[in-house]
């Protein structure tokens, strides 16, 4: 440690002060500051960046606002060493424990002992600091790209995880249970789910829990790609195989040999390409474009689709035989609005994730915010929630909670069940009855709000005065 370390010595004992001042010399990179009591020590702590408190314990005057406790609570980077007399050893040990001090030393103190203890305590603090930083980085990198060989599924405080999937709902628990079974096999898996529900995350989780985990997983989006391009991406091509093919290309099916290929938006492939896929699924044979050699590849296929392939089969838009091949296991990820129990755990997960990314301290979200989030339909599912939370973390005050005022308009304006709007829930059986009861409720509300000023109400609702009068008569509305 080359830079100067500031040590605060709190003591009235001249032998302690003497020993500390010779042990921790300026030449060794220490700057010493002396205080006689807790009060002045505390104000020093607030004024200066203190690296270590060398604290001579006086058990009779050790109150709740002592400098050790204070430094522990509000000066995270400061280390502590407790000094006590032989007779006060029990107090010293207890205080050391309670204030998470590095160690306690018994008087009389030898210079060498002080030097060593201080050096160790500072090294320890530096190591913990680095450890904290590295753990955070590690956690982020686990979150961000591949997730190493951490435990695959775990439950903690009601929050469950399957690789990077976070959930609490029983619906997700069911899907994950099936996915875990699928992972033990080599069968193709078809994952269906609306946009942003976590299809790709689930595919990765299956791959990393299968015995193919040590081989690669490659992904290919099949939507909006021409047949030729898709063919050469998946099956590869040889040089000159088509105009512009200036070098051989391996293709993902061969590159992922022994591993998994994830076919995203598989519903989008053309009828011709469906034939090629089917052949591959049946034979495991790869014929690169422009080559007459047939090669073998052992890959497991996981496919995903937003659309119901079953319906497409019924309509003749997707080959039935290919559909049956693909759905060795069929997993369906529910929309986020149908598993609201996941919203709180996902929100907290994303708050931590993004607070970590941007290095901000955010305490969490308020109950009102959670209510709003739980009642928002999230057409973009988890991805939309994630984007919202990412924004919230950026706009929240440092060290504060995410509050209603931070929410985007689309979410804060969405009605919640506690809003008055539920009073409008129309009763009645037929559509006509429902519309009428809704109309009646709106009229009653406006009339009451405008104290039965009919011109005002007509104006507000955009109908004529006569029209309003007719409706009042028809529904038998009365000033109440
Ligand atoms: N259960 C979950 N836990 C944590 N993060 C999730 C979860 N579900 C989805 N996400 C996150 O939401 C985003 C969308 O997930 P993913 O890409 O897997 O969805 P998708 O269904 O493939 O979407 P699309 O149909 O739009 O391709 C990603 O950033 C992912 O990390
Ligand atoms: Mg996707």
Image (cartoon, rainbow, N blue to C red):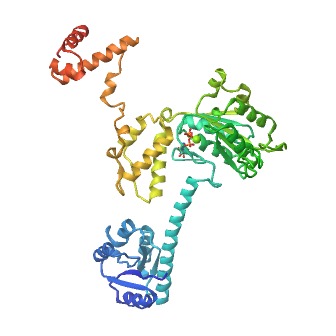
In the picture provided, is 463 more to the left or to the right than 60?
left
Task: Count numbered badges in the picture.
Answer: 0
Q: Residue at x 36, y 16 (%)?
A: 427
Question: Residue 128's x, y, as percent?
Answer: 51, 69
Question: Residue 36's x, y, as percent?
Answer: 30, 81
Is 238 or 17 nearer to us in this picture? 238
Q: Residue at x 63, y 37 (%)?
A: 304
Residue 160 seen anywhere in this rendered image of the structure: yes
Question: Residue 33's x, y, as percent?
Answer: 34, 83
Is 97 or 240 nearer to us in this picture? 240
In the picture provided, is 439 more to the left or to the right than 478?
right
> Which quadrant of the figure contains the C terminus?
top left
Question: Residue 49's x, y, as percent?
Answer: 36, 75
**Residue 468 sits in which quadrant?**
top left
Taking the view exactly as shown, the residue that stands out farthest to the right is: 293
The quarter of the rendering in which ligand 1 is drawn is top right
Q: Residue at x 53, y 67 (%)?
A: 131
The vertical placement of 82 against 260, above or below, is below
The vertical placement of 364 against 172, above or below, is below
Q: Residue at x 77, y 37 (%)?
A: 280
Is 70 or 14 nearer to us in this picture? 70
Taking the view exactly as shown, the residue that stands out farthest to the front is: 243
The vertical placement of 478 against 142, above or below, is above
Residue 211 seen anywhere in this rendered image of the structure: no
Is 343 or 92 nearer to us in this picture? 343
């Amino acid at each position: 440690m080359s830079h100067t370390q500031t040590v605060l010595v709190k003591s009235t004992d001249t032998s302690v002060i003497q020993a500390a001042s010779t042990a921790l010399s300026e030449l060794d990179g220490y700057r010493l500051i002396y205080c006689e009591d807790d009060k002045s020590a505390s104000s020093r702590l607030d004024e200066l960046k203190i690296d270590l408190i060398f604290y001579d314990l006086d058990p009779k005057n050790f109150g709740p606002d002592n400098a050790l406790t204070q430094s522990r609570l509000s000066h995270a980077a400061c280390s502590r060493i407790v000094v006590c007399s032989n007779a006060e050893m029990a107090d010293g040990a207890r205080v050391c424990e309670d204030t998470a001090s590095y160690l306690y030393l018994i008087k009389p103190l030898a210079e060498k002992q002080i030097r060593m203890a201080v050096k160790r305590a500072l090294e320890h603090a530096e190591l913990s600091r680095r450890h904290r930083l590295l753990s955070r980085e590690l956690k982020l990198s686990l979150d961000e790209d591949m997730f190493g060989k951490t435990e695959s599924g775990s439950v903690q405080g009601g929050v469950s995880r399957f690789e990077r999937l976070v959930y609490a709902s029983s619906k997700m628990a069911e899907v994950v249970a099936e996915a875990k079974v699928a992972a033990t096999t080599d069968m193709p898996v078809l994952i269906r789910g609306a946009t942003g529900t976590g299809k790709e995350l689930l595919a990765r989780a299956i791959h990393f829990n299968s015995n193919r985990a040590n081989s690669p997983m490659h992904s290919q989006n099949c939507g909006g790609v021409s047949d030729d391009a898709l063919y050469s991406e998946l099956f590869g091509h040889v040089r000159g195989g088509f105009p512009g093919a200036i070098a051989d290309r391996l293709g993902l099916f061969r590159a992922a040999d022994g591993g998994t290929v994830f076919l995203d938006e598989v519903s989008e492939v053309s009828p011709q390409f469906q034939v090629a896929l089917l052949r591959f699924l049946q034979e495991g044979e790869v014929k690169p474009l422009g080559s007459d050699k047939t090669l073998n590849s052992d890959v497991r296929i996981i496919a995903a689709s937003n659309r119901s392939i079953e319906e497409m089969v019924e309509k003749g838009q997707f080959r039935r035989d290919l559909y049956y091949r693909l759905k060795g296991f069929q997993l369906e990820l529910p929309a986020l609005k149908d598993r609201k129990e996941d919203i709180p755990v996902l929100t907290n997960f994303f708050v931590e994730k993004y607070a970590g990314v941007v290095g901000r301290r955010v305490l969490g979200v308020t109950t009102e915010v959670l209510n709003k989030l739980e009642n928002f339909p999230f057409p973009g599912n988890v991805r939309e929630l994630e984007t919202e939370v990412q924004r919230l973390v950026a706009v929240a005050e440092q060290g504060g909670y995410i509050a209603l005022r931070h929410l985007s308009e689309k979410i804060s304006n969405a009605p919640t069940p506690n809003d008055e709007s539920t009073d409008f829930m129309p009763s009645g059986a037929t559509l006509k009855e429902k519309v009428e009861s809704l109309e009646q409720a709106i009229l009653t509300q406006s009339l009451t709000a405008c104290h039965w000023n009919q011109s005002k109400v007509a104006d507000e609702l955009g109908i004529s005065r006569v029209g309003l009068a007719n409706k009042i008569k028809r529904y038998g509305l009365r000033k109440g």
